[in-house]
């Protein structure tokens, strides 16, 4: 399959073709999602919550992200692979962002990096872009700021807050970003942002009018007992996996596995 490259993202928006994105943190799931036709794979810092058992994304480090990014980029044949810059790895300066971005691009084979923030991150987006690293922005609810935002809450309600998100989106686009994630934003606000910026908007809890959608794969697949309201469970993979493990335990304990078919008889 032909690789999804940066210009395809803009072309999709211009043609009105919706983009699909899922998180992936390893080669096993990356291969499955890539073969399913997912356009973009996000090695999200949600790896902290979903895979490493943290309560938030704050403890995630660049050292956590690199092996995950390498596994996903190595497995993807078609999808455009985006890697999150984790909390504390880019906020201080454009130089810090550039050092982190270069390190990730050099060691993983990813196609782009993602970072949170609008106007406050414009200098970082510009520096990365000027160095040849495509950047995806992230506005609305930004989990790395969850302590300041008071937890996962819809952002951009009311005229003033909606206007702030629009201005941040324009700043992100102006700084050179190739796409922008809108998380937990009222659908009409996300629709307005989608209209006014030239780059694709990728929504999560941001309504149907975005140019694309992203979900955390464990939520999408129904891996856990709980999913956020905006994350539709498209499967019950957790229950299927539990049933497989229970069947395995039963057969080993009952002496029915391994049978002749699964043994070397000579
Ligand atoms: O880390 C992540 O999974 C994300 C998505 C929610 C956009 O940033
Ligand atoms: Na993230």
Image (cartoon, rainbow, N blue to C red):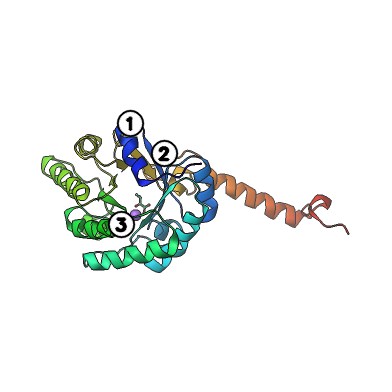
What residue is shown at x 47% (from left), y 55% (from top)? 73
Say left or right for 256 vs 17.
right
- List the single residue furthest toward the right: 266
The earlier-in-sequence mark between 3 and 2 is: 3
The numbered mark at residue 80 is none
**Which is more toward the observer, 73 or 133?**
133
Furthest-top residue in this view: 16
* Lower position in the chain sequence, tag 1 or tag 2: 1
Mark 3 secondary-structure assignment:
loop
Is the residue marked 3 within 8 Å of ligand 2, measured from its CB? Answer: no
Callout in the foreground (1, 2):
1
Q: CA distance from mark 3 to mark 2?
A: 36 Å
Identify which residue is drawn at 36% across, 40% down: 8
Question: Pointer 3: residues within 10 angstroms few (<14), some, or many (20+)?
Answer: few
Percent of width and height locating residue 142: 27, 53
Residue at position x 58%, y 45% in the image: 240
Q: Which residue position holds label 3?
A: 132
Q: Which residue in the protein does label 2 denote?
A: 232
Mark 2 crowd level (few <14, some 14–19, many ≥20, 10 Å Cα): few
Q: Which residue is mark 1?
A: 15
């Amino acid at each position: 399959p032909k690789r999804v490259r940066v210009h395809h993202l803009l072309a999709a928006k211009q043609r009105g073709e919706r983009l699909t994105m899922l998180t992936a943190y390893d080669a096993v799931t990356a291969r499955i999602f890539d073969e399913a036709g997912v356009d973009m794979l996000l090695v999200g810092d949600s790896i902290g919550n979903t895979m490493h058992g943290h309560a938030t994304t704050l403890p995630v480090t660049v050292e956590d992200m690199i092996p995950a990014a390498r596994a996903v980029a190595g497995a993807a044949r078609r999808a455009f692979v985006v890697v999150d810059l984790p909390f504390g790895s880019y906020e201080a300066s454009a130089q810090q962002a550039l050092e982190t971005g270069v390190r990730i691009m050099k060691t993983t084979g990813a196609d782009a990096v993602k970072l949170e923030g609008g106007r406050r991150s414009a200098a970082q987006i510009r520096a990365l872009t000027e160095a040849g690293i495509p950047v995806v922005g992230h506005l609305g609810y930004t989990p790395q700021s969850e302590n300041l935002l008071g937890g996962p809450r819809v952002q951009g309600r009311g005229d003033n807050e909606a206007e702030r998100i629009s201005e941040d989106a324009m700043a992100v686009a102006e700084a050179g970003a190739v796409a922008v994630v809108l998380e937990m934003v009222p659908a009409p606000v996300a629709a307005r942002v989608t209209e006014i910026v030239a780059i694709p908007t990728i929504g999560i809890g941001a309504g149907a009018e975005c140019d694309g959608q992203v979900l955390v794969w464990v939520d999408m697949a129904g891996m856990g007992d709980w999913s956020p309201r905006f994350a539709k469970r498209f499967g019950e993979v957790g229950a299927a996996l539990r049933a497989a493990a229970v069947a395995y335990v039963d057969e080993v304990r009952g002496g029915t596995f391994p049978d002749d078919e699964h043994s070397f008889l000579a």
